[in-house]
Amino acid sequence: MISPVTHDNQAVIYQLPASGIARVLHQIRLHPGITRTRLQKDLQLSQPTVTRYVHALASNGWVRDAAPVEQAPRTGRPSTGLQISADHLVIWGIHIGLRSTELVVATAAEEILAHTTVDLHVGQTPATEALDALAFHMRAPGRPFAAPVNIGVATSAHINPAGVVNNQDFGCEHVPLARLLAQRFEQAISFSTGVTAMAGHELAMTDLADPIPAGDSTLYFYIREMVGHAWIFNGAVQQRFSSRPVQLLRSDDARGAGQHALSTRYTLQRARDMGLEVRSLSQLQQHSDPRAREILDERARRIVEALSVAIDIVDPATCVFAGEAFSDDPQGLKQIVQALKRQDEHNDLPAPRKLRLAGGNVLVAAALQVGLQALWQKPEKFLTKPGEWSAWNLCLMSTPATGFPSCGFISGSLRCRRSAFSPPQSRCTASSW
């Protein structure tokens, strides 16, 4: 039964930590084995202040002693290092994409305990059914662990500050997604747009001892089934109120098809319309027909046009490329970088000083960050001693395990395959909805 209770859901704001205890935790997380002396130097804090913050974190299970990464002095008391632990603080992170959703269970130390990919086309599934399915499959991998202290949800479609999604591709017309998911989990959730969470993950890797120069900004550009971008200014990710900037990049023919001209869907559909049998971007990139390369080259030119508009307005110091449009087409990425540098050489438009490809699985990174941001930003709100489990967790533990690695759903059957790797992973494929 879905709870009718109203929950206090929160739109996530991604920014560098402001409080002293959060800044200390940030540096410990980035530099396992960091010493208290190094923390004083990095953060310009006094010894008593660092001692007080470290004691508060350590006594509540956030950090523990570790071997120092720096050479101890020849005289005096041997220095001990610090590292984040927080194994007792568990979060659930969700990234809802157009065709698949990433479900992650992790600790506050960013250790992934379980990861599941659910193949579900949300644009072709009624919203209530899709959310029922995602809530069901999130509980399965989360059941063996402590109850989540936070549940974070990111969507590849824009979600506004009220938690509402209004997107044609998602088949959502003013759907209060945050409220509906909170009712299904019977717990307040944190939420944000997916590309904003990806940019937040980039920001979370910033060393506070090496501050970003004043005035520098970063453009994070993501292209897969959906297209999105985010700006990082002055130690924070810009919070957009609508998806209009992305919609303006649609071409006339893409508007008619209901797809973005830069999206993978649109690119593959163009190839199929020309008679090319391809099902993925990597297949198109490897196709022997020269028309395949022409399609990809045309998209690369469109990407340069879109980037040029953004660069002309804000002049970012760094541009990060994310998504399969870049990772699965290295030749296209090379063309984009070369085009931006040529514009710089001809004094047409300054190119960002740093151009790079985002590393790792950005979808999982988004799911993690939307769940972890609240904890990392204000750890003092989560100073729960290890071993304290909620009644809800005990209730979950008493529920028979039904879905990991194999599970079913009332509207259709699902095939789940659990990976042999650690952490546990599975992939669920909807055979009918």
Image (cartoon, helix red, strand yellow):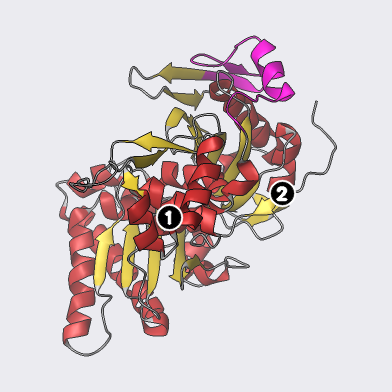
Instruction: Kindly identify the residue that appears in the image at 36 percent across and 71 percent down.
Output: 212
The vertical placement of 272 against 240, above or below, is: above
Residue 350 in the image, given as x and y percentages of width and height: 27, 83
Q: Quadrant of the N terminus?
A: top right
* Residue with the mark numbered 2: 9
Q: Is residue 344 magenta?
A: no
Name the disc covering residue 347, or none.
none
Mark 1: amino acid: Ala
Residue 206 in the image, given as x and y percentages of width and height: 37, 59
Q: Is residue 386 left or right of residue 410?
A: left
Instruction: Kindly identify the residue that appears in the image at 26 percent across and 61 percent down.
Output: 356
Mark 2: amino acid: Asn
The vertical placement of 63 against 432, above or below, is: below
89, 51: nearer the viewer:
51
Residue 279 in the image, given as x and y percentages of width and height: 33, 40
397, 24: nearer the viewer:
24
* Residue with the mark numbered 1: 204
Residue 270 visible? The answer is no
Instruction: Kindly identify the residue that appears in the image at 46 percent across and 54 percent down.
Output: 50
Q: Is residue 392 magenta?
A: yes
The vertical placement of 301 against 27, above or below, is: below
Question: Which residue of the protein is positioned furthest toward the bottom in this rendering?
Answer: 347
Magenta part of the chain = 385-414
Q: Quadrant of residue 39?
A: bottom left
Residue 169 visible? The answer is yes
**Disc 2 residue crowd, few under 14, some 14–19, many 20+, Cα 10 Å:** many
Pointer 1 or 2: first along the chain: 2
SS type, badge 2: loop
